Image: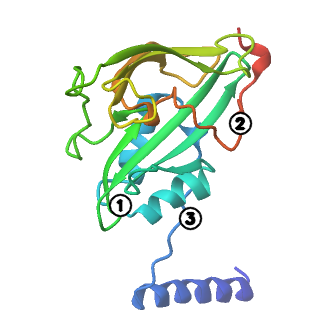
Amino acid sequence: MHVGVAMRKIHAASFALFLVLCGVRVASAESTFSFESAETLDDMSSLIRSKTPLGSSRENVRKIFVEEGRATLKVKKDDSSVEKYIYDIDLCHYYIWRWNISFDYDGSDQLRQAYVNGNTVFPHGNPKKVIPKFAEEGKKASIYRMQRPRAEAYKGESSLVFLLFDRDSDPSTTDDQALLGAGPSRADPINMGKLVTYTDVEPWRSIFDFEAADRIVPYQGNCNTSR
């Protein structure tokens, strides 16, 4: 072996040993988060449990879903301890897939529960809010048949239909509403999986939410092979 090559190897090994002795750890860079890395609802729940376990800081959750994932951040108007990150994917104009990932935080901005499209992620987190299915005292309850337009999906589901229960028949008060609807389980225009029923879901946390994302992202796969 050439003397110069041998000396460079010795120097490199010595430097690595020096870092270890000084307590310096050389860590590999973690890959950034992308919503496209989760193809199914279960995939997303697993990612959330892995990347943002209970007790995670709001700052860290935002870093992952907003800074890295480029989701649209929405803080709940009547409760600043609750916020969501929405991300829409155009599945080749057949369906607009919405990721509505919402989180509940405590007074110290520590994560207490996460939701994927309105369903809880952590069994031991804060319990899901359930709206009683009867009218408020002195008021009349209503059930509405609602539609969430998705004009971009002109080849398929251009409108999403759901039922909305409202305890006081006042659409402006949203804390007493729950919906019943359904949607696919996979963000794939070729195989959208099974039909998932959403029951007792807060509209604000759901795929039927009327708030707009900053953009609708094109499907990253090949649309020429879909359907």
Check contact, mark 1 vs mark 2: CB within 8 A: no
Classed neighbour count for the residue bearing mark 1: other residues with Cα under 10 Å, few (<14), some (14–19), many (≥20): some
Earlier residue among tags 3 and 1: 3
Quarter of the picture containing the N terminus is bottom right
Secondary structure state at the residue bearing disc 1: loop
Classed neighbour count for the residue bearing mark 3: other residues with Cα under 10 Å, few (<14), some (14–19), many (≥20): few
Earlier residue among tags 1 and 2: 1
Query: Which residue is disc 2 drawn over?
Result: 217
Earlier residue among tags 2 and 3: 3
Give the total number of marks visible in the rendering: 3
**Residue 52 seen in the current view:** yes
Quarter of the picture containing the C terminus is top right
Query: Which residue is disc 3 drawn over?
Result: 29
**Vertical placement of 158 versus 207: above or below?**
above
Query: Which residue is disc 1 drawn over?
Result: 56
Counting from the top left corner in percent of width and height, residue 211 is at 58, 37
**Residue 32 seen in the current view:** no
Q: What residue type is labelled 1?
A: Ser
Describe the colour scheme in one phrase: rainbow
**Vertical placement of 84 versus 162: above or below?**
below
Query: Nearer the observer, disc 3 or disc 1?
Result: 1
Q: What residue type is labelled 3?
A: Ala
Counting from the top left corner in percent of width and height, residue 158 is at 67, 15
In this view, the residue in front, 66 or 16, is: 66
Q: Which amino acid does label 2 sit on?
A: Val
Residue name at image x 32 percent, y 62 percent = 110
Check contact, mark 3 vs mark 1: CB within 8 A: no
Secondary structure state at the residue bearing disc 2: strand
Residue name at image x 39 percent, y 48 percent = 103
Counting from the top left corner in percent of width and height, residue 162 is at 47, 15
Classed neighbour count for the residue bearing mark 2: other residues with Cα under 10 Å, few (<14), some (14–19), many (≥20): some
**Vertical placement of 216 versus 111: above or below?**
above
